[in-house]
Amino acid sequence: MRAKCVLWRTIVWLGLSTVFVGCVATEQIPAGKSLYERIGGKPVIAVVVEQCVANLLADTRINGRFATADIRKLKGHLVDHLCRETGGPCAYSGRDMKTAHAGMRVSMGDVRAFEEDLVKAMDMAKVPAQERGELLGLLGAMKKDIIEVP
């Protein structure tokens, strides 16, 4: 019963954080510090990506989507993309999200599984709640370019 409760709280938190991340008061954010800096920079992003990909590959809901992927290349693109999206100095050389996911028939369920695996990775890396919510909000804005199947 406890596991169901924890899972339900995580799902609710994901949904609410995606909806309300834009409502975070700017005075809570240290002046002059980007999300990239507040997360801990590229070293923390690399740890989060490494753990997230491990979670994805172990997650039977979604791991089939990565069966033929070049995992090393995927990790590199994810690190660079998250680095850039959070205000870091990285250059992302991968395809835009719409092109990268075109024809993959990604569903909302696939995205939820990815988000849950990412949250687990951020928890393991001890990314603070506010920064975790902001990062999920940035990724939430990309859903329109990724999801093809409701």
Image (cartoon, helix red, strand yellow):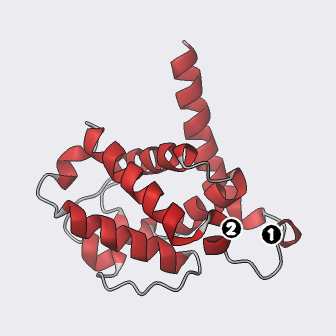
Residues at marks 1 and 2 touching, judged by CB atoms closer than 8 Å: yes
Residue at image x 35%, y 66%?
A: 146
Residue at image x 34%, y 49%?
A: 110
Q: Is residue 33 above or below residue 1?
A: below
Q: In this rendering, would 104 be left or right of 6?
A: left
Q: Quadrant of residue 98?
A: bottom left
Horizontal and vertical percent position of residue 108: 39, 51
Disc 1 marks which residue? 29
In the depicted view, which residue is nearer to us: 21 or 125?
125
Q: In this rendering, would 49 be left or right of 34?
A: left
Q: Is residue 23 above or below residue 123?
A: below
Horizontal and vertical percent position of residue 94: 30, 81
| Circle 1 residues within 10 Å: few <14, some 14–19, many ≥20 | some
Disc 2 marks which residue? 38
Which residue is situated farthest in the top direction here? 1
Q: In this rendering, would 67 be left or right of 16?
A: left
Residue at image x 44%, y 65%?
A: 143
